[in-house]
């Protein structure tokens, strides 16, 4: 029974688990593809994106936090991030052709 007192069948539980597993596999696959793309960036661009979007630690940082950690200005972090994202978009467009 669920919290509202409704009966839950085994098939509902299994189906929901399969969806969860499917989403997890899909997300992991997308994450691996993104990490492969990021390898084409220079070290600074790679680091900024990894920290900004939590790609290696699942903990996202603000541009201010990254700036402080890297001892550069927040606006420079912003420019690095923007340039790196543009490079990734170009790579994705190339791959789609």
Image (cartoon, helix red, strand yellow):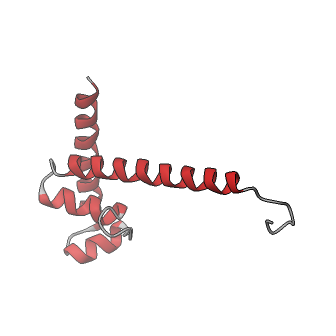
* Residue 32, image x, y percentages: 29, 51
Above or below, 17 against 96 in this view is below
Please say if 51 is above or below 90: below
Position in image of residue 76 (x %, y %): 23, 61
- The x and y percentages for residue 81 are 28, 54
- 89 and 75: which is toward the camera: 89
Q: Residue at x 23, y 55 (%)?
A: 80
- Tell which residue pokes out farthest to the left in this image: 42
- 2 or 72: nearer the viewer: 2
Instruction: Please tell me which residue lies in front, 70 or 95.
Output: 95
**The furthest residue to the top:** 97
In the picture, measured across the screen, residue 52 lies left or right of residue 48, that is right
Task: Give me the residue at 19% from left, 56% from top.
Answer: 45
Q: Is residue 75 above or below residue 22?
A: below
User: Is residue 50 found left or right of 21 in the rendered image?
Assistant: left
Count of marks, rendered view: 0
Indicate the quadrant where residue 70 lies: bottom left
Up-down relation of residue 90 to residue 83 (above or below): above
**Depth order, front residue of 4/50:** 4
Image quarter where the C terminus lies is top left
Q: Quadrant of the N terminus?
A: bottom right
Q: Residue furthest right?
A: 5
């Amino acid at each position: 029974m669920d919290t509202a007192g409704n009966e839950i069948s085994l098939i509902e539980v299994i189906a929901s688990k399969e969806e969860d597993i499917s989403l997890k596999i899909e997300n992991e696959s997308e994450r691996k593809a993104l990490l492969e793309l990021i390898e084409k960036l220079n070290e600074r661009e790679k680091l900024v994106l990894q920290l900004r979007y939590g790609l290696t630690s699942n903990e996202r940082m603000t541009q201010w936090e990254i700036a402080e950690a890297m001892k550069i200005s927040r606006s420079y972090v912003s420019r690095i991030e923007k340039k790196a994202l543009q490079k990734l978009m170009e790579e994705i467009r190339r791959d789609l052709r």
